């Protein structure tokens, strides 16, 4: 093995180890009463689950099967303290085992070591983090199924492991039909028999609890939290949140569950027969998540296993599904989607929608598809040579496409990036004393430079009603509208320039976060004793101790640099550089002019804040130049427009080399063509089927 791959492998394992250690430390670092909260509630006065009454007494949070209770019941009180540590490290080992088994089950070869990547993703995922903190056993059924499908010796051993998993989580019993339909009938029968045997054993040991679980609660429905809560990411839970209660809701849930089972199992069987058994297991697990009466967040690990499937014929689309799954499994829905009423049904059910998509919708490629290992390559643009010998550095990640980037991926990146920006901006808040001290320093510097025009502009604005209304409206409205509009136009009309503009804006925003973090600054409107009037937010009682309380909602001390002015300046520069008409360029310059007037006259920023905004924008363009090269690109192989303006720049025809390397179109799923793999027949083959002849002259042949 060469040094490069070995170093990369060691680095990936180091990352996995750091994430695992961080997860263990996060659990064990909490006080005993605050960690493993679900496990702690199982502990009775004489031991873990060693209680005299029912496991499901009123007020109990135990939601496992009676078999799980029977397994945990013998643990004694003396083991309680050591149990927390043992449980945490045992969970860690289970996660590592799941990652290793899943990585080894991947079909074909991968470019990066799969095991450390899988373990890292599992450690970051919400289901695993919840299992660690709550002390849940939901990882065990996943591992048992994976071991039964990929590591067990013999059909009986596989069925035994799957049956044990079903005894702990009844929805796992859906893997028995998968085993039967893929020809492993002995394993299917054994799994069902094991499930029945374990449940019967638990019934004999805990008859009252078994009756409560299987009869009164219909396989656990209604145990634990409310089934209509957001934590229940199943079809049943979603219907309850939509108001489908009673008999109608039950019937609708049963019908939808039957449809999902029918579609999902058919797809899983097809992928298993195609040689993608891990994908088949993931699809079946996603079906189990959707049709379970309750699918709590710590039971959703099956969705993460759907990363085994490959989606997309083009290389630039291949990352969309993995990115969607990773984001859904690591971030809450409020980060993925904005807090707006019309997207609430989607935001509240993001994991369920991901499970349904993996089970029934996503067109995973079959191994017979020519695009499975070799997707259509991406056509990258080349920048013109730079004047400086060391520029551009040409970092591969900043290479620009000639065609449009994938829209779904772009929207996800923009939304998650803005969510991260908002959280960091809020976390960078400081106490009012520090922010006011910085404000006095900035004010003093402006007076020294004779640019302290904020007070004059603010009081002049108050006396001009129409101008005050206009600048207040402009300050609150166009901060996001103009950058998004320009990005949308560039995405559609000039994709390569879109990447240049989007990346430069991202760099400027990240640099602004550094300023917010290290230099919290009170804007003029929050400076006591200077006589500024907040025209946008209304009068504030600066003498009141809580006058800065809104900082808990939005960081009001994130004033240096001013991104209001920085983003408007970015808009002006981008349009001036790219617009084809002079009037467009002049019109674009009005945005930074109006914005700088608004932020100063409304007492929301100092003059030097605007200077800081201009500085980070200039640095953003400079970083993009260093990493990606000049904005201008070498002409494509195909004829291009010579106008040099924002003319339509749709996906240009690929080069002849790309066409030669492109495989023949084939369906994503299903069997290969009858003549797949044969050499092409000669054109003059007398046995060729008749068809339209492109050349009407026989002599020419």
Image (cartoon, rainbow, N blue to C red):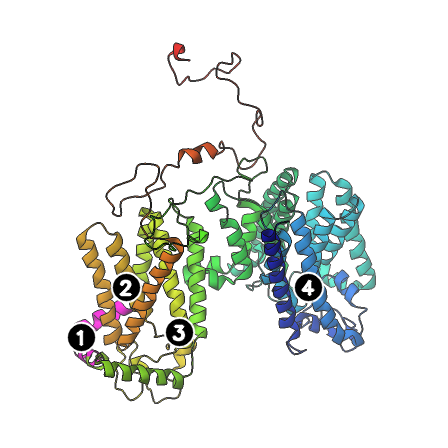
Q: Residue at x 72, y 38 (%)?
A: 183
Say whether marks 2 and 3 touch (CB < 8 Å): no
Per the image, the residue denoted by label 4 is 92
Q: How many marks?
A: 4
Circle nearer the N terminus (2, 1) = 1
- Where is residue 670? Give x, y as percent: 57, 34
Q: Report, in whole angstroms, how far the alpha carbon at label 2 lies from the one at label 3.
A: 19 Å
**Label 4: how many Cα within 10 Å (few below 14, some 14–19, many 20+):** many
Which element is circle 3 on? helix
- Where is residue 375? Give x, y as percent: 50, 40
Circle nearer the N terminus (2, 3) = 3
Which element is circle 1 on? helix
Which of the pair 508/176 is nearer the observer? 508
Q: Report, in whole angstroms, how far the alpha carbon at label 3 lies from the one at label 4.
A: 37 Å
- Where is residue 88? Give x, y as percent: 69, 68
Q: Which residue is farthest top?
A: 699
């Amino acid at each position: 093995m060469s040094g490069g791959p070995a170093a990369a492998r060691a680095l990936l394992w180091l990352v996995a180890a750091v994430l695992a250690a961080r997860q263990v430390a996060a659990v064990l670092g909490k006080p005993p009463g605050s960690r493993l909260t679900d496990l702690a509630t199982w502990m009775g006065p004489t031991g873990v689950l060693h209680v005299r009454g029912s496991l499901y007494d009123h007020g109990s949070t135990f939601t496992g099967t009676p078999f799980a209770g029977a397994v945990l019941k013998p643990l004694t009180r003396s083991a309680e303290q050591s149990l927390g540590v043992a449980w945490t490290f045992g969970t860690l080992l289970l996660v590592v085992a799941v990652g290793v088994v899943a990585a080894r089950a991947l079909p074909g070869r991968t470019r990066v070591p799969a095991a450390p990547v899988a373990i890292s993703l599992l450690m970051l995922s919400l289901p695993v983090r919840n299992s660690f903190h709550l002390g849940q056993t939901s990882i065990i059924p996943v591992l048992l199924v994976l071991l039964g499908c990929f590591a067990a010796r013999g059909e009986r051993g596989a069925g035994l492991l799957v049956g044990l998993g079903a005894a702990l989580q009844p929805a796992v019993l859906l893997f028995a039909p998968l085993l039967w339909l893929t020809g492993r009938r002995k394993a299917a029968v054994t799994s069902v028999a094991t499930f029945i045997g374990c449940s019967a054993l638990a019934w004999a040991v805990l008859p009252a609890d078994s009756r409560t679980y299987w009869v009164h609660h219909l396989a656990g429905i209604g145990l634990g939290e409310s089934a209509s809560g957001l934590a229940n990411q199943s079809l049943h839970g979603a219907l309850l949140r939509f108001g489908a209660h009673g008999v109608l809701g039950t019937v609708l849930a049963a019908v939808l569950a039957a449809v999902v089972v029918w579609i999902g199992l058919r797809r899983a069987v097809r992928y298993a027969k195609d040689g993608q058994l891990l994908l088949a297991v993931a699809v079946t697990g996603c079906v189990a998540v959707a049709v379970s009466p309750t699918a709590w967040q710590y039971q959703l690990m099956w969705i993460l296993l759907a990363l085994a499937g490959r989606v997309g014929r083009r290389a630039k689309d291949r990352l969309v599904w993995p990115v969607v799954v990773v984001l859904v499994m690591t971030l809450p829905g409020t980060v993925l989607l904005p807090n707006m009423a019309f997207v609430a049904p989607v935001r509240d059910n993001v994991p369920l929608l991901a499970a349904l998509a993996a089970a029934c919708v996503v067109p995973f490629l079959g191994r017979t598809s020519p695009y499975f290992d070799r997707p259509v390559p991406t056509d990258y643009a080349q920048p013109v040579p730079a004047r400086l010998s060391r520029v551009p550095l040409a970092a591969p990640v900043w290479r620009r496409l000639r065609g449009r980037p994938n829209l779904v991926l772009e929207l996800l990146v923009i939304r998650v990036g803005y969510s991260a920006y908002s959280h960091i901006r809020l976390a960078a808040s400081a106490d009012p004393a520090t922010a006011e001290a910085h404000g006095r320093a900035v004010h003093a510097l402006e007076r020294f430079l004779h640019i302290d025009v904020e007070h004059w502009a603010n009081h002049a604005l108050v006396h001009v009603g129409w101008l005050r209304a206009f600048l207040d409206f402009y300050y609150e409205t166009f901060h996001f509208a103009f950058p998004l509009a320009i990005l949308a136009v560039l995405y559609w009309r000039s994709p390569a320039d879109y990447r240049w503009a989007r990346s430069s804006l991202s760099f400027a925003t990240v640099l602004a976060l550094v300023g917010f973090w290290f230099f919290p600054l009170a804007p003029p409107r929050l400076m006591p004793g200077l006589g500024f009037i907040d025209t946008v937010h209304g009068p504030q009682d600066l003498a009141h101790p809580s006058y800065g309380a809104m900082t808990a909602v939005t960081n009001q001390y994130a004033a240096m640099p001013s991104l209001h002015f920085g983003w408007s300046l970015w808009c002006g520069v981008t349009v001036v550089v790219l617009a084809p008409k002079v009037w467009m360029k002049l019109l674009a310059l009005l945005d930074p002019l109006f914005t700088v007037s608004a932020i100063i006259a409304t007492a929301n920023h100092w003059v030097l804040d605007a200077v800081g905004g201009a500085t980070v924008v200039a640095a953003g363009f400079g970083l993009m130049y260093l990493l990606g090269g000049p904005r201008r690109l070498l002409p494509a192989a195909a004829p291009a427009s010579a106008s040099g303006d924002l003319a339509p720049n749709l996906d240009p025809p690929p080069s002849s080399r790309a066409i030669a390397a492109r495989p023949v179109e084939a369906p994503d799923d299903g069997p290969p063509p009858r003549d797949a793999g044969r050499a092409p027949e000669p054109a003059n083959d007398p046995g060729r089927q008749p068809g339209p002849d492109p050349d009407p002259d026989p002599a020419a042949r």
